[in-house]
Image: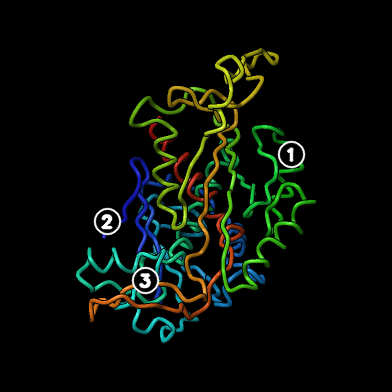
Amino acid sequence: MSDIWGKNIQFAIFGESHGTAIGGVISSLPAGIEIDFDAINHELRRRNHRAAYSTPRAEADAFEFLSGVYDGKTTGSALSFIIRNQDTKSSDYKNLNVTPRPGHADYPASVKYDGFNDYRGGGHFSGRITAPLVVAGAIAKQILKLQGIDVFAHILSIGSVKGKSFVDTGICDDTVKNLKEKIFAVADADLENAMMAEIEKYRSEGNSIGGIIECAVTGVPAGVGNPFFESVESRLAAMLFSIPAVKGVEFGKGFDITTLSGYDANDAYRYDGDKIVTETNNNGGILGGITNGAPVIFKTAIKPTPSVSMEQKTVDLSSKADATVEVKGRHDSCIVPRAVPVVEAAAALTILDILRGN
């Protein structure tokens, strides 16, 4: 499987959901960066927190550095790490190699790999494989912080319950601080109960629901990126679509910008002392594929978790006949809250990679 990403920093990811371990290798990191282990653990806890809407699978997600770190600092050589799987229950996935689950990668993976793919818990296609991405992203965040760059996200919507975009409200320091401390990262605290109720409505039916995560990257100077194929949007979108369950990406106003006139869609410039700033941020801080100094803002659409306990139509690959399947196992009724740090990690790695080559 080709799972190596990056141009100036290379990141390889490996493992299966029910295998011995999952992990990653990061190459070309600068040497001498002091690693904050507590910060990495905090990011992993955000991804793996326990709640009524999350899977009961209880993984410690304790990471182990194998190389690239000495006396707490990066050495400049490849940084490799593993996260051991401990709470697997593979019996829940019996026969899914012949009755693929709708909405999962079971069927296309079986075709591509001639049936030899590890389908237990989704194998290499599982959301569990995002844990190594969070570790790598946590390290990238620490390096970006040294350059005055911050990455943070919030739950913009769950199902039909929707909050307000950073594009419309702006970004204040108190909002950022609160989001980083919250497990259920919603910017508008008044919407939290409504979002939780929306999740519970589907969970109680054995069903699931999706939502939208909005992410902002602040502190990126103007002039970062390239036009066309190496644009900041292109690079971010490619990485974001690598996250399981992401089905859409928008920058700034996104599709809603089509309802504005050209005059209203444009982000007017002005001087703030010696600094050039924009009056609005409808374009998400990127023009011509290059940053303009405003916060880089984008939204990701997260689909409902495909593992629902309701009977679904499928096929039996062994008998070549139509069939039904009832998905067993331990699954999230809404993956959105746990996907917030994953989206942040993807953004942090991408921005760091772009900056290293700018």
Q: Earlier in the sequence, mark 3 or mark 1?
A: 3
Q: What x and y, as percent, mark residue 291?
A: 50, 26
Q: In the image, which is nearer the foreground, mark 2 or mark 1?
A: 2
User: Above or below — where is 4 with respect to 128?
Assistant: above
> Which residue is identified by label 1?
173
Q: Return the residue nearer the eye: 261 or 182.
A: 261
- Circle 2 crowding by C-alpha within 10 Å: few under 14, some 14–19, many from 20: few
Q: Amino acid at mark 3?
A: Gly
Indicate the quadrant containing the C terminus: top left, top right, bottom left or bottom right: top left
Place of residue 77 in the rendered image (x, y in percent of width and height, measured from the top left): 36, 53
Residue located farthest toward the bottom when viewing the structure as drawn: 91
| Foreground tag (3 vs 1) | 3
Q: Position of residue 122 (x, y in %)?
A: 39, 70
Q: Does residue 62 sit above or below 277 in this rendering?
A: below
**Disc 2 versus disc 3: nearer the observer:** 3
Relative depth, front residue between 20 and 303: 303
In the image, 140 versus 19, the foreground residue is 19
Q: Look at mark 2 in the image and give the residue it sits on.
A: 2
Determine contact: label 2, label 1, CB under 8 Å: no
Q: What residue do we see at 63% from left, 68% from top?
A: 53
Mark 2–mark 1 distance (CA, rounded to whole Å): 40 Å
**Residue 23 falls left or right of residue 153:** left
Q: Residues within 10 Å of mark 3 (few under 14, many from 20)?
A: many
Q: Are marks 2 and 3 in contact (CB under 8 Å)?
A: no
Q: Nearer the viewer, residue 29 or 140?
A: 140
Which residue is label 3 attached to?
123
Give the farthest residue toward the left: 114
